[in-house]
Amino acid sequence: MDEDEYRAVYKAVNNNRCVFEKALNNRRCDCEKKERKLIATREAVGCQSPTALSRCTEFLNTMRQKARFSLRVVTIEGPMPHNKELQVQAGGCLQLQKILFPEQKIAPADSLHKQPEKAANIFAIVNTALAQYGSIEQFPYSEIVQGIVHYKSRPKRKRS
């Protein structure tokens, strides 16, 4: 299957594409509203709820905007390069979870043998934050951006 054909099938099969797809496919986040679909040998992630999708889209766009200067990508509009986008998606969700649930200890991955830190449920995290802060614009983005900047996608492998 060539790339153009894959994209056409992807759009036909996955019309409610999850905006946190990179973090979900990287297994750094999870969501109760996700819907995984297999297309050829690739995984696509959709959203079962239009309301949740719109909330997540607003949250992700706001995180991107707030983190642009810190990530040194002020000239890029919309989605960022893959690793920066993963930093925003996973790092932002993990940091918001730490802010909302400080009693939960999320140990960072410091070796290849340990599981990487993982946000439990994006849908629940966003809804809890909305209940606590009132609106997505009121989330503590100065703290969230710190988590985005310090997020490491995976530990570097040691050469043997």
Image (cartoon, rainbow, N blue to C red):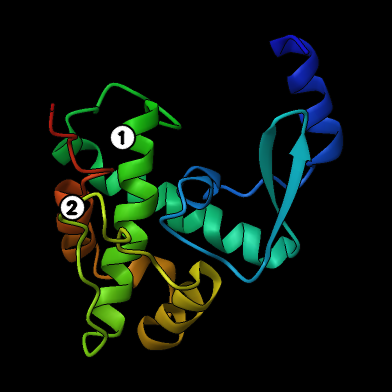
User: Do the numbered discs 1 and 2 sit on residues whose CB atoms are within 8 Å?
Assistant: no
In the rendered structure, which amino acid carries the disc numbered 2?
Answer: Ser
On the rendered image, what quadrant is the C terminus found in?
A: top left
In the rendered structure, which amino acid carries the disc numbered 1?
Answer: Lys
**Residue 142's spot in the image, x, y percent?**
16, 61
As drawn, 72 above or below 19? above
Query: Of the numbered discs in the image, which one, if any, rests on residue 111?
Result: 2
Identify the image quadrant of residue 140: bottom left
**Residue 60's spot in the image, x, y percent?**
44, 51
**Residue 51's spot in the image, x, y percent?**
69, 66
Q: Nearer the viewer, residue 128 or 157?
A: 157
Relative to 110, 37 lies left or right: right
Q: Nearer the viewer, mark 1 or mark 2?
A: 2
Q: Nearer the viewer, residue 6 or 141?
A: 6
Instruction: Determine the residue positioned at 63% across, 71% down.
Output: 32
Residue on which disc 1 sits: 84
Instruction: Determine the residue positioned at 45% across, 87% down.
Output: 131
